[in-house]
Amino acid sequence: MRPFISAALRALIVTMAAPLLWLCLAQAAFAHASLTATEPADGAVLAGAPSRFALIFSEPVAPLVLELVGPSGERRALEGARLRDRTLEITAPAGLSDGTHVLSWRVVSEDGHPVGGAVVFSIGAPSAAKPIVAAEGDPTVMAALWASKVALYCGLLLGCGGVFAARWLTQSSDGRRFVVICLMLGIAGAVSGVGFQGLDALGQHMVRLADVRTWGAGLSTSFGRTAIYGLVSIAVALLAWITSGAIARTLSIVALLGAGVALSASGHAGSAKPEWLMRPTIFTHAVAVGFWIGSLVPLGLSLRRGRVEAREALSRFSRTIPFALAGLVLAGGVLAIVQVENVSAMVETDYGNVLAVKLGLFATLLGLAIVNRYRLTAMVSAGDRLATRVLVRSIVAETVIVIAILASVAAWRFTPPPRALAAGDARSAHIHLHGETAAADVVFRPARRGPVVVDITVLDGDLGALNVKDVTLFMANEAAGIAMIRRRAREGEGAVWIVEDLVLPLAGRWNVRIDVLISDFEMARLSGEVEIDG
């Protein structure tokens, strides 16, 4: 195999292997869509059976598994879920018995990442049933899913972009072997990615890869659309290789644009608001990237072989790349601003860390491109052989950096963007406390360690509004050795009392006590527990 292609392929293998090892050591997958609220609230005690359930997320989701576990352990599949904006509405079964129920759910977010959990609520009074803990992701499945993503990116960007470059820039078959290999990788990544996506969505292990339900689940996610569009785009690119003339050039345009459509069909950025802006932005970014990096190998090989047409091809590329680069940078900037939201997230979140690595690699790539265009291109066009050799080596280096960028971008599949984390931080916790003469609905906003606002709705024994003289909140964490933290609530509108100066220093299960002064001679004391996240 020729040295240029060999170097690029070796870079592909090495770059994919290093993050693969990291992923194999990962212990759990990060969820992207965040559950922000539920109806009934987690831990709620209801006077009667609810008519519906609602799961409210930070972004649109699609249901995978919805199941209700009753007090005696009986399981019922819940059907007929409806998505209204970001709220998943579920009709509750008739005849729910008293006691503790568990609504077990597993959904998939817009980028294809599955999210699971459980909502515990009681009817009448709690029973002894314990909540179900959702299973964590399989590291082997995660690693395979990451590798399939990298392969698909290679097929759509290096492959479809390479065909476009061969038909419009170099107008030769230079780089054919490398481009075809990338297209084959893309096919393998799209097909296998559906299966791995299904395993991850259902929380299954690799041994269930052959299960028909696994592939059905994978296709039902938004990644299923990306895989289908990607396969069509790659098929069109292959047709462009075996045809010629105007037909081949037209097919190469369709393939490159199809790659942009495929990559914009799924992913977190596409589900961000406003979608009318975000999806076209992803499309623009992908097409610009495909044009740039897809041109590298065909152009480099054409120059290395000393073809007369190579100088004209380099000139065409040099005239066109500033426009593609402008679209790439503008679109990438919009995506970064929406996803990251603040500069501190670049350091404080895994998503920001990956973005920082990508930006560092991109800056290096851009530096090489600037030197190539403004220093070497003119010398190569003038016939300088030494400059030509230097430019070819620079293109090899650019190709290596490109593959590293694709490998880092694929890691975003496992890192929630700060935008999603912020929505997750807004998750509240609700508990219901009941006594003989009074009751209270208590909401903690957010249910995380740090500053917390507590809304306390005071009710009478029949769950009607109750006018009281004073409300005091007490919080303790006996396991951590934290004695009672006392905060007096201020009266809000209606029967709501508010605590605004509470800081919970630790995550975990906290004891909650509320003293309600009903009159000068009557005090109600209500107690319970709340789970505070880290």
Image (cartoon, rainbow, N blue to C red):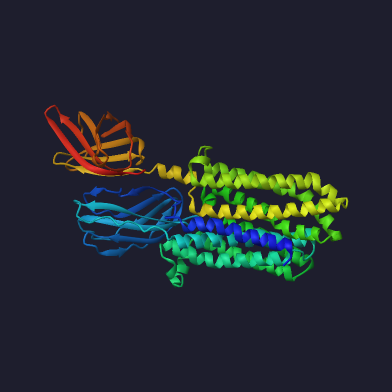
User: Quick check: 337 above or below 167?
Assistant: above
Of residues 276 and 286, the one nearer the viewer is: 286
Is residue 368 or residue 40 the one in the foreground?
A: 368
- Tell me residue 256's x, y (percent): 68, 59
Left or right side of 37 for 343: right
Residue 98 falls left or right of residue 217 = left
Q: Would you identify the image quadrant in which residue 239 lies?
A: bottom right
The residue furthest right is 382
Q: Measuring 23% from the left and 31% from the top, which residue is drawn there?
A: 472
Q: Is residue 325 above or below residue 168?
A: above
Quarter of the image with the N terminus is bottom right
- Residue depicted at 21% across the width and 58% down the height: 97
Whether residue 494 appears in this view of the structure is no
| Residue 474 horizontal/vertical position (percent) | 23, 34
Q: Is residue 206 above or below residue 415?
A: below
Going by the image, does 533 lie left or right of 243? left
Task: Indicate the position of residue 56 as horizontal and vertical percent values.
Answer: 39, 49
